[in-house]
Amino acid sequence: MTTKKTTKKPAPAKTLTKPAAPAKTAASTAPHDSIAENRRLPIMAATSIPKVPVGFVPTPNEERTRRLTRPAEALRAELLVALDEVISRKATYHAELGDLAPDPAQAEALRPRLSALRESVVAVDSLAAFLHEMEEIAVSDAADFLQSVTEEVEHRARKKTELAMAYSRVLHIAEQRRQLISNGIARAKDKKDPGSPPA
C-alpha cells in the first residue's frame, strides 16, 4: 500500500504590527496676541496718578541744553558710584583735596535724590508706554466702530435721508478720513513726479 506524502504548507509569515504611537497633543502655535490681551486691561483713573508739585515751571529745552551738563547715558550709573566714593571719604576729604574742593555735603544730598529720580523716571516711563499703547488701541477700536456705523448710515440714508443729519458727526469723521487719505495719495504722487504741472 502506497502511503501518500502530505506536504505541509508553510505557515504564513506573521506580520509584526508596531503599536500605534500615542497621539501627541498639538501644541498651540498661534502667536501671542498682545493687542487682544492689552485691550482687556483696566485703565487707572487720572486722579490716581500723582500730580506735578505746585511751583514747577517747565524750562525751555534750549535753556536746559545751554545751562545743564549732560553726561552720556552710560555714565549715569557711574555717577552714583562716584558720589558714594566721595561720601565714603568724608572724614579725610578736605585733608586730601584742600579747602577749595566742593563741600562733600552736596554729594550726600545729591546721592539719594539722583537715585530716587532714576527709579521714578523708570516707573513713569513704563506707565507712559502702557497708557500710550492703551490709547492707541482704544482710538483704533473707536475708528473701526465708527467706520462700521458709517457704512450702515450711508446705506440706509438712501431711503431715510434724515439719518444723514442724525449722524452728521459720524459722517463728518468719515469724510475727513477720506480727505486725508486723498491728500496723502496726492502728496505721494507729487514726490514721485515733481515735474508734473499742478492739477
Image (cartoon, grey):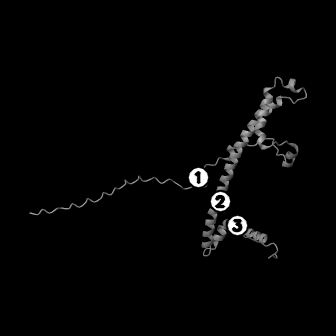
Q: CA distance from mark 2 to mark 1?
A: 15 Å
Nearest the camera: 124 or 149? 124
Residue contact between numbered discs 3 and 2, judged by CB atoms under 8 Å: no
Residue for badge 3: 177
Q: Label 1: few (<14), some or many (≥20) within 10 Å?
A: few
Quarter of the image with the C terminus in it: bottom right
Q: Label 2: few (<14), some or many (≥20) within 10 Å?
A: few
Q: Amino acid at mark 3?
A: Arg
Q: Label 3: few (<14), some or many (≥20) within 10 Å?
A: some
Q: Can residue 53 be seen at all in this image of the molecule?
A: no
Mark found first going from the N terminus, 3 or 1 = 1
Residue under the point 66% across and 58% down = 139
Q: CA distance from mark 3 to mark 2?
A: 13 Å
Q: Amino acid at mark 1?
A: Glu
In this rendering, is residue 155 above or below 15? below
**Percent of width and height locating residue 27:** 50, 53
Residue under the point 82% across and 28% down = 105
Give the numbered dot on residue 37. Answer: 1
Nearest the camera: 130 or 84? 84
Q: Amino acid at mark 2?
A: Ser
Nearest the camera: 103 or 36? 103
Q: Can residue 62 be seen at all in this image of the molecule?
A: yes
Residue for badge 2: 140
Badge 2 element: helix
